[in-house]
Amino acid sequence: MTNVNKVKRTEETQDFINQLPKKPGIYIMKDKNEEIIYIGKSKSLRNRVKSYFQENLDRPKTAVLMSHFNSLEYIITNSEKEALILEANLIKKHRPRYNIRLKDDKRYPYVKLTDEAFPRLIITRNIGKTGTYYGPFTDVGSVRQTVKFLKQLFKIRTCNKMDGPCLNSQIDLCYGPCDGQITKEEYREHIKKIDLFFQGKYTKIIKDLEKEMSEAASKQEFEKAGVLRDQIQSIKGVMEKQFVEFENETDQDIIATALTQNTAIMVILSIRNGKIIGKDDFLMVNTPDNTSDEIISAFIKQYYGMNRHVPKEILLEEEIEDSEVIEDWLSDIRGNKVHIKVPQKGTKLRLVRMATKNAEIIKNQKQKMENSLVELKKYLKLEHMPRVIEGYDISNISGKLAVGSKVSFLDGKPNKKEYKKFKMNTPGPNDFAMMKELLERRFKPLAEYYALPEEEKTPLAIGKEPNLILIDGGKGQLGMAVEVLKKYNLTHIPVIGLAKEFEEIYLPNTSFPIRIPHNNEALHLLQQVRDESHRFAITFHRQLRSKKIEESPLDNIVGIGKKRKIALLKHFGDLEGVKKASIQELLEVKGMNEKVANNVYNYFNE
C-alpha cells in the first residue's frame, strides 16, 4: 500500500485523473472544509474516478455529491480485497454524508467469556480486545435467561475475585476453582461445552456428556453420573424449544431488503446448526438513486465488519457486484470458505422469500408510522415534525408512594433509554401539584443548560428537548404544564393534554378540544404514548408498594411470613390498622391463629 495522494479541483484536475493508476485502491472525496463526503473503492482507480467527471452524470445523487467536491485523495492497495477492507473500515470511522450507511444505533448485548485462568460468562454491550464474544443478541431478556441457564448448568464461577469459597460453591452452584476444588483442565472442559452451545452444536455437547456419564458410571462415580444426566436432560430441553429445523449442519444468514423513498430496510435471518435462531432488521440511509444490489453489497460489508459471526453461507435475493471479492474477504474473517448464493428453488428460495416478506412488513410499518407523524403535525398545526414525543403521568394511592413517569418516543417508537421515573416529594393527594413538580424536575435542568455559556456546555444528561409534550389529562393538567414551560422560557415546545374519556386533545389558549378520527394513526400514536406513560408510572408505583410491604415491622414478629403479612395489610388497609387491632379483630384475618394473633398484638402493645 502506498502513501495517500491528493489533488484539488482545478483546471488541471482532468490531467491529474488521466495520470491515475489503473490499480486497485480507494478514493476519498472532500468538500471545501476538508470534510470527507464520500469514500469509494475500485479495481481500477483511473476508470472509476474518471466517471465522476463526465459532463452528464447518470444519477442525481452523484451530481449533488460533485457539487460539493473540492479535493480527492487516493490510496493504492495490493488487491481488490484489500481495497474492500479499507473502504469498509474508513466508512465505519468517518460516516461520510453521501455513502450508503448502515444506521446501527442499537447497542445490542454480547455474551463474553472472559480471558482468565478460570473464565466467567458475562453480558456486555462493549467489545474489548480480550475474551471471546458471542452475539450480538436482540432479545436482552432471552440472553439473560441463557447466561443464567449456562452458569447453573456448568457451574462456572460468577464472582469477580478469587478470594476463597463463595456462597455459590457452598450451595453447589459453582465448582469452586477459588478453593482448588477443580483443576484448570477440568474447568476448561466446561468452557468448551459453553462455546459449543453458542455455536448451536447441542448434539455434540450431548454426545460428549453421554460419554462422560458412561465413564463415570463404569467407575461407580454415581453422583457425577447423575449430574451429567441432568445436564443432558437440560440441553435436550433447549433443543426441543428450537422448532424450525433444516439440514443439521446448516450455518446460514439470509439477507433481504425493501426500499423506501430515502432509506432501505434490511432483514437478516440467522440459521445455526439447522435452526432459525434469530431475525433482525436494520436501516440503511443515503440510498436514493442506488440500486438494491448496491445497497445489499454495502450492508454486507458494514454488517460483517462489526465483530459479527460470519456464516458458512449467505443467501441473497439477487446477485451483487464484487461477490467474489466479498466472499474472499469473509472467508478470511471466518477462517474457511464462505459462499454467497442466490437460490433459484427449494428450501433456500423459500427462506429468501420469508426474509423478503419480513422486510416488506417492516417497510409498511415504517411508512405507517411516518404517516402518523405527518398527520399529527397537520392536526396539531405543529411547526416541526414531532419526531421526539414525551409523555408524562402521575401514579399514587391517596397521595401515598406517589411517583411520576417520563416516556419518550422517537419516530413513533418507544425510546426506552430516555425513560425516567421519579419519586414525588409533593404531599398528596394533589395530582396537579405533583404534575407541576414532575415537569419542573424535567425542564428546570434543560433551562439551566440553555443558560450556560457555550464553552461550559457538556453533553446533556437529561436528554434533548422534545418536539411535543403529551400530558395525561384535560385542561387543568395542561394549564399546569403551560405554567411550568412559561416559568423556564420554554414556551416554544408544543404541549397538549389527552383526556381519556372522549379521547379529546386540548391545546393551550383554545376553548374547544380537537377530536382526531378514532381510526386515524395520529390518534393511535398519541394513545400509545399516553398509555405507555401510564403503564410505566403504575409499574414503578407497584414496585414501591411491594418494597414497602417487604420492609415492614411485621417481619420481626414470630409466625408472620409473607402470606400472613400481605393478608394483614389487605384486611386492615395499612400498618396503622394492624397496630390498632384487637386480638379478636386479628383472628378475623384469613390464615391467622390465636398464638400468632397474640404475638402481633403483644408486639405493638407491650
Image (spheres, helix red, strand yellow):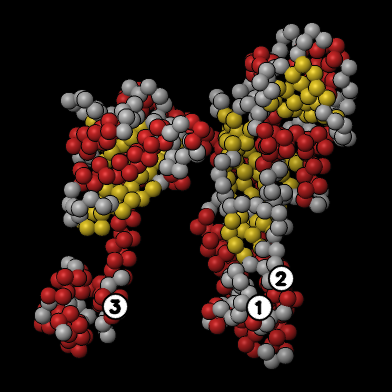
- At 30% from the left and 56% from the top, the residue drawn is 541
Residue matched to label 1: 177
The location of residue 453, given as percent across then percent down, is 46, 31
Q: Which comes before the other along the chain, label 1 or label 2?
A: 2
For badge 3, the amino acid type reads: Asp
> Looking at the picture, does residue 283 appear above or below residue 160?
above
10 Å crowding of disc 2: few (<14), some (14-19), many (20+): few
Vertical relation: 413 (above or below) 421 = above
Q: Secondary structure at mark 1?
A: helix
- Mark 2: secondary structure: loop
Q: In the picture provided, is 444 more to the left or to the right than 291?
A: left
Q: Tell me the amino acid under the disc marked 2.
A: Ala
Measured along the vertical axis of the image, is residue 376 above or below residue 105? above
Query: Which of the pair 188/367 is nearer the observer?
Result: 188
Q: Are marks 1 and 2 in contact (CB under 8 Å)?
A: yes
Residue with the mark numbered 3:
555
The quarter of the displayed image where residue 132 is located: bottom right
Q: Which mark is residue 236?
A: none
Q: Can residue 512 be seen from the camera position used here?
A: yes
Q: Earlier in the sequence, mark 2 or mark 3?
A: 2
